[in-house]
Image: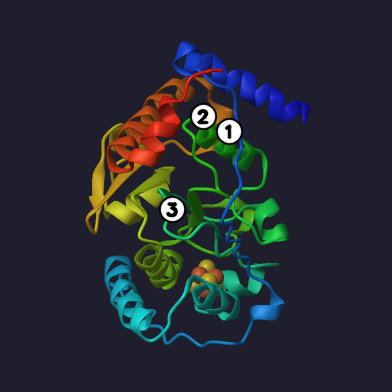
Amino acid sequence: MTTELTLIADFLELAGDYLDRGYRRERQNTVILEGGPELAGRVELTRSPNLAGDQEFTRGAELARGQELAGDSLERVSSDIAACSACGLAALRNRAVPGEGVQNPLALVIGEGPGADEDREGRPFVGPAGQLLDLMLASIKLFRDKNCFIANVVKCRPPHNRDPLPEESAACASFLARQIALLKPRAILCVGRVAAQVLLKSSEGIGRLRGQFAEYQGIPLLPTYHPSALLRDQSLKRPAWEDLKLLKEKLAGLDPVYAGECRETRP
Ligand code: SF4
């Protein structure tokens, strides 16, 4: 708790007078999607490991559209992930990490892959970076148990927290594409270089990609810094906050209820 309070104070300092309320967490309609051995082996997914990442995303989206008609669901994607051994990361994982959040979220947050804490718990962004991510999102009224979904490009932990290899991202791409097609988020927040590069099919650094909206299959997509980078480099917190304000403005323009929540004043 002490660590959390420290992070709250730190981030609020950046927000300044912009924030007119404290953090008020509201919980409803929670959908928690965790991988686990109880899900393994239920569904086999035919894969094409030689496809490039962008082809895999396209194929995954088509697959999702087709399976949506045939009863595809987030739970089914999770069970596919838990049973998957399409790349070498399968042999190294303790638990796959499909993602968690709510159906039809305002924001889908996408990172690069699970770390040690996430691999142990089977949940995304649960370590120190995840705690900071929750605080960042809460500062603009976004919560993983209310109006967000959090996922990664690869669903199994790369060893020593290295970047996912291109072939690993490609092998895993259809899962994320299916999740996006099923979730239908109002906006996507890519945290970190890897996620932004994969989704945008770009080789640009995150410093050049962040700060402006792009588009993924018609969905507004905003790249920003990964919270673990913010923990390492304090100077990145201000541009990250500017990115969050952009996301808040975008979502407020898309969702009147969210806009109203953002307008609430301190009692
Ligand atoms: S990272 Fe993705 S493709 Fe590789 S084994 Fe895990 S779920 Fe399958």
Tag 1 secondary structure: helix
Picture coordinates of residue 264, whole percent (x, y)? 46, 25
As drawn, the label of residue 139 is 2
Would residue 119 appear left or right of 220 to someone viewing this image? right
Q: Nearer the viewer, residue 245 or 153?
A: 245
**Residue located 58% across and 64% down the image:** 156
- Taking the image as shown, residue 177 lies to the left or right of residue 156, namely left
Which residue shows up at 37% across the image and 30% down it?
243
Q: Quadrant of residue 254?
A: top left
Q: Left or right: 160 with respect to 242?
A: right
> Residue at (48%, 24%) from the top-left corner?
237
**Does mark 1 have its CB less than 8 Å from ligand 1?**
no
Amino acid found under the numbered disc labelled 2: Ser
List the residue tagged with mark 1.
Answer: 135
Q: Residue at horizontal 49%, vertical 35%? A: 141
Kindly identify the amino acid type of the residue bearing the numbered disc 3. Answer: Pro
Would you identify the image quadrant in which residue 143 lies? Answer: top right
Q: Is residue 166 placed above or below 66 in the rendered structure? A: above
Q: How many marks?
A: 3
SS of the residue at dot 2? loop
Q: Is mark 2 within 8 Å of ligand 1?
A: no
Q: Could you give the CA–CA distance between mark 2 and mark 1, rounded to whole angstroms?
A: 6 Å
Q: Position of residue 226 (x, y in %)?
A: 48, 39
Measure the C-alpha gap from mark 3 to mark 1.
17 Å
Q: Secondary structure at mark 3?
A: loop
Q: How is the image coloured?
A: rainbow
| Dot 2 alpha-carbon crowd within 10 angstroms: few under 14, some 14 to 19, many 20 or more | many
Quarter holding the C terminus? Answer: top right
